[in-house]
Each structure stands twice: as structure tokens, then as C-alpha cells.
Amino acid sequence: MKIAVIGATGGTGKKVVERALELGHEVVAVARRPEAVASANQLTIRKGDVYDAASMVLAISGADVVISCIGPPSNISEDPAKKGNLLVNLRAGMKVMAANFSPGTIMSEGMPNVVAACGRAGVKRLIMQSGINLTDGKELTLGNRLAVGTMRRIFWRAIKDKAMAEHAVMSSGLEWVIVRASVLQFADGTLNYTAGPAARIAPLQALPFADCADSLVRAAASEPAWTRKIINVGR
Ligand SMILES: NC(=O)c1ccc[n+]([C@@H]2O[C@H](COP(=O)([O-])OP(=O)(O)OC[C@H]3O[C@@H](n4cnc5c(N)ncnc54)[C@H](OP(=O)(O)O)[C@@H]3O)[C@@H](O)[C@H]2O)c1
């Protein structure tokens, strides 16, 4: 399968590219800074900015499915020597929090452009990475529902921006899957995680980026029953 990954330089996006290649897919990494993507066999690297609708059409043309891992830039970067290091994850967590306080409009403006680009490029399937904070929490334990409710109040700007993006995806005619992830961290992937519609995950228990990436590749390529569903992923 030919999979285009938007946001291929991010914490999750990088791992999605790696996982899709590992599973034998052909991958197109789409990035604002293509020079930041390491080359590999079966990997094509294309420049694209989600604010520039025309660049999106060119970037995803020829793909069978698109996975979006875009988000308000948090500029987190993984130092392989410190993988799993508490300080690395703490710093990354602070940057993600800062990005959520001032999310801008990347999701609400960017995702409609991605949806339109799929239409124009003839791509029928679109996977969007979102966050567990978008849930009303009904499927979670009482404690986790309260935690999500608190986070929704604190990060209301990011929730509003992402809700508009989710709406654009859900109201498209595409075969979409929205994957709402718990808090993520740099750590080795385990493939031991929970994912599914209304899955009862723990929003604040950190999941490796690599495991979230695996669920996104599954949504793209091997979970037809997830089509037009919201999937929670976490521990
Ligand atoms: N990290 C978490 O704990 C967590 C938990 C749940 C959900 N999420 C959500 O999942 C998504 C991905 O999270 P992440 O932590 O992997 O994000 P990230 O590391 O901050 O990566 C964001 C990606 O979006 C790209 N991007 C930003 N603006 C763009 C634009 N205008 N055009 C094209 N690409 C653009 C960035 O590219 P540049 O490298 O060029 O900036 C980067 O590749 C986000 O929506 C985030 O809110 C994150």
C-alpha cells in the first residue's frame, strides 16, 4: 500500500514513517522541511505545508491513504542517546503543553485543506491523529473522565481548534478514521497497547510514540472495521 504521512518530522509522524516501512508499505513523507527527513528504501520525500492547499494535492497524489500527524509545532526532538530518559520526556511534555496553550489554527485550517486535497488527488482514505481530550469522557472511568474534563478546560483553545478539524474530517465523504491518543512519550515501542472504538484508556498514562504510530498504520492499512469511527489509543 502507498501511504502518505503528513507531519513526518514530528514525534509521531517519524515513527509512522518507520513503522509503515517496516511493514513493507511504500511511504511518502510530507514535510515543510523535507531536508529533516532521513532517506530510506521505499520512501519518497515531498515538501508540503497544510496551509498551502495546492502543495498538499501534489504531495499526496498517487497515495492510497493519507495519515495526518500534524499539530501545533512543539519542536520536540528525540535524542536517541537519551531515549526514555525522564528529563527528555519532561522537556517534551512541557513543549507539548506550551503548544496546546497557543495552538494557532493549524488543525482547523490545515485539516480542511488536507480533506480537500484528498478529494482533488483521488485519495479515498484519511487517518487523522487527534487527542483523547476531545472525548466527553463517557467511555472512561470516573477518575479519568474528571481528568479529561480538567484538561479540556485548561487547553480549551487546542480543543476548539482540533474539534473543528475533526468535524471537517467526519463530514467529508472520505473513508476516515480519527485516532485519539493519550499522552505520548519517547520510549521503545511495545505493541502492547489498547486501541479501538470507545476503548477505555488512561489518558494520562504515557504511551510510546511508536505504539501510537502502530495504531495509525493499522487504521490506514489493516483495520477496515475502524472506518468512519473514532478510535481511542493508549494504555
Ligand atoms: N505529543 C503528545 O503527547 C500528544 C498526545 C495526544 C495527541 N497529540 C496530537 O497528535 C498530533 C501529533 O503530535 P506530535 O506530538 O507527534 O506532534 P509534533 O511532534 O509537534 O509534530 C507536529 C508535526 O506537524 C508538522 N506541522 C506543523 N505545522 C505544519 C504545517 N503548516 N504544514 C505541515 N506540517 C506541519 C510539524 O512539522 P515541523 O517539523 O516542520 O514543525 C511536525 O512534523 C498533534 O495534533 C498533537 O496535538 C499529541
Image (cartoon, grey):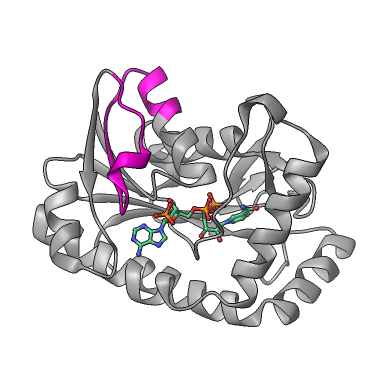
Magenta span? 18-40
Q: Position of residue 48 (x, y in %)?
A: 24, 55
Image side of residue 53 versus residue 100, left or right = left
The answer to whether any part of residue 171 appears in the image is no
Foreground residue among 14 and 85: 85
**Image-based side of 203 in relation to 17, left or right:** right
User: Residue at the spot x=62%, y=70% of the render?
Assistant: 100
Q: Nearer the viewer, residue 130 or 74?
A: 74
Give left or right: position of 42 versus 20: left
The answer to which image quadrant residue 115 occupies is bottom left
Residue 42 picture location, percent across and down: 24, 21
Check the picture and name the quadrant holding the C terminus. top right
Magenta stretch: residue 116 in it? no
Q: Residue 22: where, in percent of width, then height?
A: 41, 18
> Would residue 164 appear left or right of 137 to someone viewing this image?
left
Q: Residue at x 54, y 81 (%)?
A: 160
Res 234 → quadrant: top right
In the picture, the quarter occupied by the N terminus is: top left
Q: Is residue 77 above or below residue 142?
A: above
Is 31 within the magenta? yes
Q: How many marks?
A: 0
